[in-house]
Image (cartoon, rainbow, N blue to C red):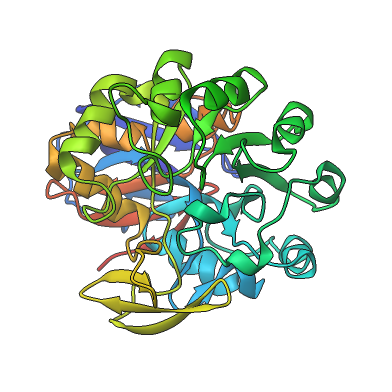
């Protein structure tokens, strides 16, 4: 397949893609004509007027379209994620019992749409004081043997101050994130030096950044690790988002959706991690009133970040290349020769026009 006359970094290019979904070449285009359509003759797509960016990578999402990771049925999830611009994903589990978690990791993941690259285990190795929308009933100490028995767990959120969780962090070979935590600065620094690489949904479910008690956010600053942030405009004030952007930059700030099954649906009552939540005016809360996960797709969070003042190109990087680097993915999140052809075509108004997954057109917006 070839994308002709597509704007890449504001320069018109032709991108050739192999049959197995790899970018073969990127050359400057010599054509001056065409219309902004994804339709093309045979395997040539005329993209005049459209910009190409990498497909989004969501490392923290629980669900959408009425489906949840804990349902362990990924056909609908991956289809809807892809149609909304997320081409690679780490479905995120909840604080639940071991058998429920195992059922997720044993489920069929080779489905169409967004590619499941592994799972993110958010709980049960957390602090019940900062449980947020997690189910306190299942909170417990970290168990490295239990964790290693769960196939495909590539990312885990841990509260380092609880139980014997620090020893777990030392032994864990997955990407460890500090989250749902009440730890202080020194404990967070110790966790980072023992292997933790990221904060989970920064500012949410953790101590605030105070001038004499900087907590885990301060530790992330001084130890130069990654931070996740939900940029839906609800979970974190735009001033705090901009502060993270200016401190951590595009190389260490990762935009996430933290979406739940209500994403893409209307207000109402939904199940989340064995609990009922209410979504009112797009805001999800547990019955106690605590804010839950978001109702936004990652693409909406990217656009929201841009609306807050982050340059659009930087917001895209923080939802593509930066999470790819965190997860050790060399050929995802970038547009270059030999990279995977997971691509989004967008128009001048930043609307999604076409989603390409593994070198094939997956969805075209009419």
Looking at this view, is 84 or 240 the one in front?
Answer: 240
Taking the spot 33% from the left edge, 56% from the top edge, the residue there is 354
Toward the front, the furthest residue is 212
31 w.r.t. 219: above or below: below
Q: Is residue 29 visible?
A: no
Q: Is residue 250 left or right of residue 159?
A: left
Image spot of residue 296 (x, y percent): 32, 61
Taking the spot 37% from the left edge, 25% from the top edge, the residue there is 214
Q: Is residue 184 visible?
A: yes
280 w.r.t. 200: above or below: below
Looking at this view, is 142 or 13 the one in front?
Answer: 142
Give the quarter of the image for residue 32.
top left
Q: Is residue 92 left or right of residue 239?
A: right
85 w.r.t. 98: above or below: above
Image spot of residue 287 (x, y percent): 39, 78
Q: Is residue 197 left or right of residue 31?
A: right
Image spot of residue 343 (x, y percent): 41, 44
Image spot of residue 70 (x, y percent): 62, 70
Taking the spot 84% from the left edge, 51% from the top edge, the residue there is 146
């Amino acid at each position: 397949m070839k994308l002709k006359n597509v704007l890449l970094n504001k320069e018109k290019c032709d991108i050739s893609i192999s049959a197995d979904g790899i970018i073969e070449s990127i050359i400057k285009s010599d054509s001056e004509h065409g219309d902004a359509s994804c339709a093309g003759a045979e395997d040539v797509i005329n993209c005049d007027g459209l910009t190409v960016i990498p497909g989004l990578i969501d490392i923290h999402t629980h669900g959408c379209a009425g489906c949840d990771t804990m349902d362990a049925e990924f056909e609908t999830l991956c289809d809807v994620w892809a149609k909304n611009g997320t081409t690679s994903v780490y479905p995120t589990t909840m604080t639940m019992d071991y058998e429920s978690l195992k059922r997720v990791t044993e489920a069929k993941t080779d489905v169409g749409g967004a590619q499941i690259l592994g799972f993110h285990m958010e709980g049960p190795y957390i602090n019940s004081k900062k449980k947020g929308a997690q189910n306190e009933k299942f909170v417990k100490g970290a168990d490295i043997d239990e964790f290693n028995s769960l196939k495909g767990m590539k990312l885990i959120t841990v509260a380092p101050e609880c139980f014997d969780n620090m020893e777990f962090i030392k032994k864990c070979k997955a990407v460890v994130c500090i989250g749902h935590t009440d730890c202080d600065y020194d404990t967070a620094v110790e966790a980072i030096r023992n292997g933790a690489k990221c904060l989970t949904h920064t500012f949410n479910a953790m101590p605030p950044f105070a001038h004499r008690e900087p907590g885990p956010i301060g530790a992330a600053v001084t130890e130069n690790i990654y931070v996740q942030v939900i940029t839906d405009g609800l979970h974190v004030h735009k001033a705090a988002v901009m502060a993270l952007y200016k401190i951590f930059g595009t190389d260490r700030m990762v935009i996430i959706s933290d979406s739940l099954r209500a994403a893409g649906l209307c207000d109402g009552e939904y199940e989340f991690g064995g609990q009922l939540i209410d979504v009112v005016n797009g805001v999800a809360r547990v019955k106690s009133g605590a804010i839950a996960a978001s109702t936004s797709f990652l693409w909406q969070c990217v656009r929201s970040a841009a609306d807050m003042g982050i340059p659009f190109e930087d917001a895209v990087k923080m939802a593509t290349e930066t999470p790819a680097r965190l997860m050790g993915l060399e050929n995802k999140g970038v547009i270059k020769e030999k990279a995977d052809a997971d691509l989004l075509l967008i128009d001048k108004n930043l609307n999604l026009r076409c989603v390409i997954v593994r070198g094939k057109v997956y969805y075209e917006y009419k």
